[in-house]
């Protein structure tokens, strides 16, 4: 089959426009599809698909979770090819792959680590002298605080525009996965103040984009930029070196449930498509309670 690389690009373009996928997800899909194209050598049929999956498992020893993710990408690709009459049948439907998806508990930060993140970002802003430093550190503090206080994904933070800020309601309009929107209320006054300080400074910049968070060039701050900002601040704060910005989302959800929030509300705040996805955070809170009882229950030592 010729022009497979072209079809990959077209498929990804359609996915971006219809599913509102994040930049990171787009890169992952592209990597998965290019890996498959390289393996199949231009030939697509049932046998090639089965051999590819066997190759992932037997030759490359990838875990079931990784293979499952790659299969999800291939499923979308084959659906696209079939919809465009580029293949006679959807070969993916002829193959019945079953992999047990590994269920891993989300990793979180402690309240002390969250406090250190905010303390470090605040200290950097307060000690800033030059205009570029004031701009950078004010943006960083507002960004980190919004991620902590709302639990939004970094791709969602990157996509926030000025029109998405409802100042009278202290609310943000978040554009989530699957082109779904949700409103997030900023309940913490300090977070709202940090955001407003950044907005006031932002007005003085020569910016062409309407995005809330921007880089030095005045363009939209992408997810890689957000990851870099978090990496630098966490290192200065001396917290868990393996943590990522997504830990903030996990921490947000876990603490809501630990403090008594109902599961349905947390699902809506996180923008999960199903409450079943949110339920995994209840396992964390249960595990933490077990750890506390194991360590501190006086009855254990009697």
Image (tube, helix red, strand yellow):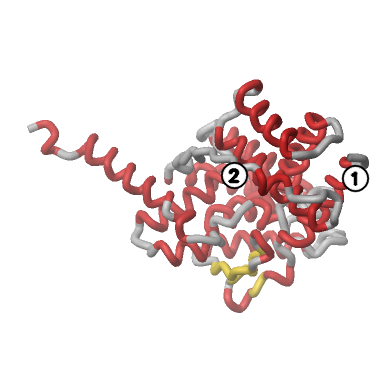
- Residue in the foreground of this view, choosing between 19 and 187: 19
Secondary structure beneath label 1: helix
Please report the residue visible at 63 percent of the width from the left and 49 percent of the height from the top.
126
* Outermost residue to the right: 2
Can you tell which quarter of the image residue 94 is in? top right
Q: Earlier in the sequence, mark 1 or mark 2?
A: 1
Please report the residue visible at 35 percent of the width from the left and 48 percent of the height from the top.
285
Direction from residue 291 to residue 280 in the image, left or right: right
The image shows residue 253 at horizontal and vertical percentages of: 46, 54
Direction from residue 265 to residue 167 in the image, left or right: right
Reply above or below: 170 against 103: below
Of marks 1 and 2, the one in the foreground = 1
Please report the residue visible at 58 percent of the width from the left and 48 percent of the height from the top.
122
- Residue in the foreground of this view, choosing between 160 and 237: 160
* Outermost residue to the left: 302
Please report the residue visible at 54 percent of the width from the left and 38 percent of the height from the top.
99
The residue beneath circle 2 is 245
Neighbour tally class for label 1: few under 14, some 14-19, many 20 plus, Cα within 10 Å: few
The residue beneath circle 1 is 6
- Residue in the foreground of this view, choosing between 289 and 277: 277
The image shows residue 217 at horizontal and vertical percentages of: 85, 50
* Whether residue 224 is visible: no
């Amino acid at each position: 089959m010729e022009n497979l690389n072209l079809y990959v690009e077209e498929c990804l373009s359609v996915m971006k426009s219809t599913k509102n996928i994040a930049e990171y997800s787009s890169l992952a899909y592209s990597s998965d599809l290019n890996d498959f194209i390289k393996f199949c050598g231009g030939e697509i049929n049932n046998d090639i698909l089965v051999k590819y999956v066997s190759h992932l498992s037997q030759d490359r020893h990838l875990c079931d979770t990784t293979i499952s993710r790659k299969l999800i990408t291939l499923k979308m690709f084959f659906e696209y090819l079939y919809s465009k009459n580029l293949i006679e049948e959807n070969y993916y439907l002829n193959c019945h792959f079953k992999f047990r998806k590994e269920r891993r508990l989300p990793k979180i930060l402690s309240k002390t680590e969250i406090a250190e993140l905010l303390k470090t970002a605040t200290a950097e802003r307060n000690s800033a002298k030059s205009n570029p430093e004031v701009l950078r550190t004010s943006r960083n503090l507002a960004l980190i605080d919004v991620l902590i206080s709302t639990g939004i994904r970094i791709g969602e933070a990157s996509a926030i525009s000025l029109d998405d800020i409802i100042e009278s309601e202290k609310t943000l309009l978040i554009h989530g996965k699957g082109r779904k929107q949700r409103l997030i209320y900023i309940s913490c006054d300090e977070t709202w103040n940090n955001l407003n300080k950044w907005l006031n400074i932002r007005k003085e910049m020569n910016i062409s984009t309407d995005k809330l968070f921007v880089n030095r060039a005045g363009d939209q701050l992408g997810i890689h930029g957000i990851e870099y900002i978090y990496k630098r601040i966490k290192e200065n704060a001396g917290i868990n070196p393996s943590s990522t910005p997504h830990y903030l989302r996990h921490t947000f959800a876990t603490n809501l449930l630990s403090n008594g929030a109902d599961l349905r509300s947390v699902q809506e705040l996180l923008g999960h498509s199903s409450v079943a996805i949110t339920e995994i955070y209840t396992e964390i809170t249960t595990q933490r309670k077990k750890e506390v009882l194991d360590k501190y229950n006086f009855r254990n030592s009697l």
